[in-house]
Image (cartoon, rainbow, N blue to C red):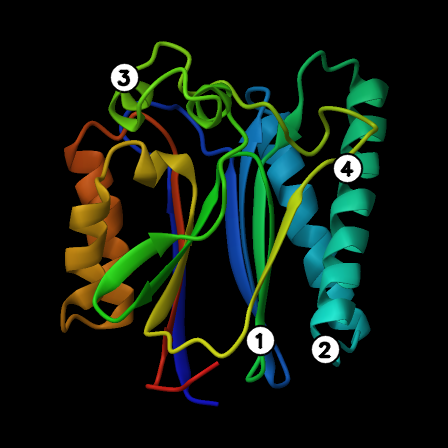
Amino acid sequence: MIWKYSYATDTGRVRSHNEDAVQIFEQGEMLIMVVADGMGGHASGDVASQMAIQFIQDECEAGFVINDKDEANAWMTHVLEQVNAAILEYAQRIHAKQMGTTLVIAVVTKEFIAIANIGDSRAYLYAFDQLRQITKDHTFVRELMDKGQISERAAKIHPRKNVINKALGANEKLEFDFLTLENYKADSILLCSDGLTGLVEDQELTKVLASKLDIDDKVQLLIKKANDEGGRDNISIALLEFGGVSI
């Protein structure tokens, strides 16, 4: 399968440290993309997001095998459950009152793309010159939108727009979303933290993804755009480009 990928994280222009974590793992004929946005302050949020990345890295090094979308969903459930338990245990051990992380993860093969997410880190699909958010934010304002109480425009300026309803490490009971894409013609997949999407409009994201820039330059340009808009949060991006293949 022909693909190119790139990923990067940036502290931004306001925060003193980076609580995000991002990685892409190549596992034979499969790619695993992951973005985590930690919460809880220094020595808590960054630990939580790194726990997620480290667990997935350990799984890759152990050489697990995924044969179909059901196995991918089962494996992602395993990842989220284990990381959730580890964060809860660690938070109790260090007496952290608030500690957790969002997570969006994509398992990409020739046959399918399986995605799981919890929190407000997002996955986008870019195809046929259009960008589409394919995950749903687990936020207070998203809930209001679903109930028809506020518009999308109002949600963008709502004073509680950054309040997250679900996260790893928040509760013993874990709730997250799955999505499987099959038979899609895709140009690229973008995973990112809200440090990007909170500042850069979809129209600008689309322009960068549609450009002729090298994939590494696209990632850096997206980070620059977020920083040019104030860089109020950490910014993490994982980008995968397909070589004109159907999935």
Residue named by callout 1: 112
- How many C-alpha atoms fall within 10 Å of the one at disc 4: few (<14), some, or many (≥20)? many
What is the CA distance from the residue labelled 1 to the residue labelled 3? Answer: 36 Å
Which percent across, then down, holds residue 219? 29, 58
Q: Which residue is mark 3?
A: 157
Q: Does residue 139 appear left or right of residue 225 in this picture?
A: right
Residue 68, numbered label? 2
Q: In whole angstroms, how far apart are the C-alphas of marks 1 and 2? A: 8 Å
Residue corresponding to mark 4 = 84
Measured from the top left, where is residue 197 in percent x and y?
32, 39
**SS for tag 4?**
helix
Between the residue at mark 4 and the residue at mark 1, the CA separation in whole angstroms equals 26 Å
* Count of picture labels: 4
Q: Quadrant of residue 108 in the image?
A: bottom right
Q: Tag 3 or tag 1, which sits nearer the N-term?
A: 1
Q: Amino acid at mark 2?
A: Asp
Q: Mark 2 vs mark 4: which is more N-terminal?
A: 2
What residue sits 28% from the left and 18% below the top? Answer: 154
- Give the mark, 4 or 3, whose residue is nearer the N terminus: 4
What is the spatial separation of the Cα atoms under label 2 and label 4, in whole angstroms?
24 Å
Marks 1,2: beta carbons within 8 A: yes
- Left or right: 174 in relation to 30: right
Of 239 and 189, which appears nearest the observer?
189
Residue at far bottom of view:
1
Q: Residue at x 58, y 55 (%)?
A: 105
> What's the residue at 59%, 23% (across, down)?
165
Left or right placement of residue 38 versus residue 175 in this view: left
Q: In the shown orientation, is residue 98 left or right of residue 13?
A: right
